[in-house]
Image: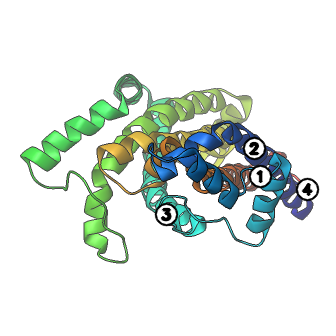
Amino acid sequence: MVSYILRRVATGLVLAVLVTFITFWLLSFSFDGVVTNVLGPAASPDAVEAMREQLGLNRPLFAQYFEWLGGVLRGDFGVSLFTSEPVATAVSARLGVTLSIVLVALVLSVVVSVLLGVLAASRAGAVDRLAQGVSLTGLLLPNLLIAIVLVVVFAINARLLPATGYTPFGEDPVRWAASITIPVTVLVINGVANMAAQVRGTMIGELRKDYVRTLRTRGVPTWSIVYKHALRNAAAPALVVLSLEFLAMLGGALIIENVFALPGFGSFAFNSSIQGDIPVIMGITVFSVMLVVGVNLLIDLVNGWLNPKARIY
């Protein structure tokens, strides 16, 4: 298991180098535009050339990249071209905001999806129709529409929750919970729509297998068959959907953060890309790749713990 983890980490590092180099290469085509954005459209050609020289943009691409990579290995991601804020500090702070929303939404989505999916597969009837209706509704309604409706109902009309803004947990846990309630609800609706259907389908398949019939003939209680045996064996496909849903929620955070004016990772990445803030874009790329690698590794480890047949040594 240790060797497997080390291999995955090494693969992640290689992937990070490849992705960051490709990103840096693509950004090199817009270096002149970035300098113009920093100095302003009225900047003279001499000022633009001086800025290029100051930033080292006149040097060979490989020299620039490996200098940046060396700084990253030392923990120095550079500073923003527009705010002079250290990239590592800026990205980690915004990522913390996004993860505080996404992780809460993911946990709630998993709990609701498992309950709905298991009940729908084991009891059928009205519960099954309810689960399928929830999934279909969540898939058909876009996040933006759900967000607008919830803001109108709970923030504007009922005035129970804030419509925009974010309060850090350390500052006030109650206000923090209130500030993320609507964004989390939007993500949960879509997450349950995706995961409940997967749990239902895999559970139906498991409950039709021979070992389930054997357990029933031996008098094993239904709840034990469903939750101790069938659900454990159905976990692998659901975990794959869980990892994909986590990444989808990170992507959907861009819309959510803009709607609710949250200082998160998605809106920060979007604004930095529009500005052409090269150090920030590179830092965002590194954090994103390593986050994806870490989530996939964690899912593999959990899958191996739940299912001995899937364990990797």
In the picture, the disc for residue 96 is 3
Q: Earlier in the sequence, mark 2 or mark 1?
A: 2
Q: CA distance from mark 3 to mark 4?
A: 33 Å
Asked where in the image residue 77 lies, by quadrant, the reply is bottom right
Question: Which structural element holds mark 2?
Answer: helix
Residue 168 location in percent, x, y?
Answer: 36, 70
Q: CA distance from mark 1 to mark 3?
A: 28 Å
Q: Earlier in the sequence, mark 2 or mark 4?
A: 2
Question: Which structural element holds mark 1?
Answer: helix
133 with respect to 48 (left or right): left
Question: Mark 2 is on which residue type?
Answer: Val
Residue assigned mark 4: 313
Q: Earlier in the sequence, mark 1 or mark 4?
A: 1
Q: CA distance from mark 2 to mark 1?
A: 28 Å
Residue 303 location in percent, x, y?
Answer: 72, 49
Q: Which label lies toward us, 3 or 2?
A: 2
Residue 127 location in percent, x, y?
Answer: 37, 31
Q: Earlier in the sequence, mark 1 or mark 3?
A: 3
Question: Which structural element holds mark 4?
Answer: loop
In-front residue for pair 304/171:
171
In-front residue for pair 146/136:
146
Q: Residue at x 50, y 52 (%)?
A: 38
- The answer to whether the residues at label 1 and label 3 have Cβ atoms under 8 Å apart is no
Q: Earlier in the sequence, mark 3 or mark 2?
A: 2
Q: Residues within 10 Å of mark 2 (few under 14, many from 20)?
A: some
Whether residue 114 appears in this view of the structure is: no
Q: Which label lies toward us, 3 or 4?
A: 3
- Quadrant containing the C terminus is bottom right
Q: Residue at x 53, y 31 (%)?
A: 200
In the picture, the disc for residue 304 is 1
Question: Mark 1 is on which residue type?
Answer: Gly
Residue assigned mark 2: 19
